Image: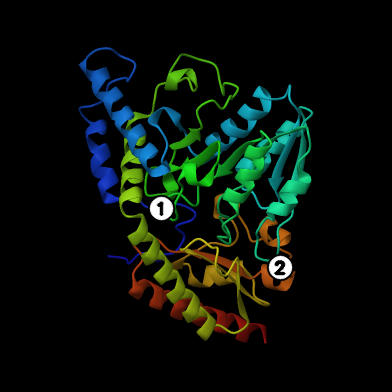
Amino acid sequence: MTKHPIYLDYNATTPHAPEVIEAMRPYLVEHFGNPSSSHWYGRKAREAVEAARCQVAALLNCTPAEVLFTSGGTESNNHAIRGVALARRGHGKHIITSQIEHPAVTGVCERLKQDGFEITYLPVDGHGMVSAGDVERAIRPQTILITLMHANNEVGTIQPIEEVAALAQARGIVFHTDAAQSAGKIPTDVRALGVDLLSIAGHKLYAPKGVGALYIRKGTALERFMKGAGQEGGRRPGTENVLEVVGLGKACEIAHRDLAANREHMRRMRHRLEAGLLERVAYLSVNGHPGNRLPNTLSASVEGLDAGAVLTAIEDRVAASAGAACHSGHVHVSHVLQAMRIPEEWARGTIRFSTGRMTSEEDIDTAVAVVADAAERLRAGRS
C-alpha cells in the first residue's frame, strides 16, 4: 500500500475526527427526516439540530439561541458583515478592518464599497498584529462595524480582540471576529472576548466541509441574509443540513472537552518542527508573533528559494502550503506577508506548516529531514 505524505496543512482543512463520523452515521441512514416536519422523522432531525446547537454554544460560552448554522466560515463572515452594514446604514457607513483579513472578509467589504460604504484597512506590525491604538484612532462618529480576525490563517498571530472589543462596546459599535482558525485551538469564549459576532468553520476543527456557525449576541440586529421560509428562527431560510450540523456539533463538543490537551499537543509538535527546521535549514526565518501565535502554526521563510519549488520537491513526502492554501493556485507574495513588510526575497520562499491532533513526533522528525534535504538540493542547484 502506498504511504500517504505526512499532513502538515491543518489550517487549510482537517480530516474528519472518527467520533464525528460516528455521530453523523445515523443521519446518513435512518434519521433522514426534514427538521421542519412534525412527524417522528422530522422530530428526530430537529432534536439532532438543537442538540448540536447546544454543543456549539458550549464551546463559545453563549446561549443556544445565539448560534446560527451556516454553510461555513465564508457565509458566516458575509452574513455578519453585510447583515450589520445593511441593518445599521442609517447610523453611518464606515467599517474598520485590517490589511490581513481572509478574502471572505475583504471580499464582502469591497462589495459594500460599491454600495457607498467606506472601509478603513488598518496596517499591521512586522509580527502581523493590529494595534488597538490604530483602531481607536480610526473610529469616527459614522463607524458602525469593526471586523478583525481572531488569529491569522497564514502566520498564526493572535489579535488583541478583547482590547478592541472594549473600544467598540464603549462607543456602541458592533464588533465581529472571524474565528475560523482559532476555534478548537485556543479559547473562543465570546463573553470573555466581548464580541457581538463570531464566525466558525466546521472543516477547520475536524467536522465536514460545508457547515459552519455564526454567533450573534442577543439584541444584535442583522439584515436577513436571504429570502425564504422560517428556518433557523427566521434568520436563515432553507432546510438545515442535518448531517453536517450534527458533525459540527460533535466536533465542537470534542474541541471544548479536549481544548487544553489538544492545544498543548499541537504546540509541542509545532515547536519540534520549528526547532528542527531552524537547526537544519540555512537562511530560514519564522514569521508571526513569537508569543501570541496559534499553537499549531509555523510560517517559515527560506531566503532566495521559491516556495513552489520546495513544495514540489517534497510533495510525495510532506503536504504543506505556500501562502493561504484556500485561494492559492500558485506561489505569490501573499497580502499578509506584504502587509507585514517581509522582504520579497524571503516572502517568495514562505511555507506554512500547521500541525493537528493527529500529528506525531515521527511525522515531525521525518518532515524536518525531508524539507531540509529539499532546501539543500535546491540551494545547491542554484549555485
Asked which quadrant contains residue 169, the reply is top right
Nearer to us of marks 2 and 1 is: 2
Judged from this view, the residue extending furthest toward the front is: 170
Mark 1 crowd level (few <14, some 14–19, many ≥20, 10 Å Cα): many
Quarter holding the C terminus is: bottom right
Mark 2 crowd level (few <14, some 14–19, many ≥20, 10 Å Cα): some
Q: Residue at x 65, y 39 (%)?
A: 170
For the question of whether residue 370 can be seen, the reply is yes
Gap in angstroms between the C-alphas marked 2 and 1: 28 Å
Q: Picture coordinates of residue 274 (x, y %)?
A: 50, 75
Asked which quadrant contains residue 207, the reply is top left
- The answer to whether 45 appears left or right of 133 in the picture is left
Element assignment for label 2: loop
Q: Residue 8 versus residue 263: which sits nearer the camera?
A: 263
Q: Which residue is mark 2?
A: 342
Q: Which mark is residue 373?
A: none
Q: What amino acid is labelled 2 in the image?
A: Ile
Q: Which residue is mark 1?
A: 14
Asked which quadrant contains residue 375, the reply is bottom right
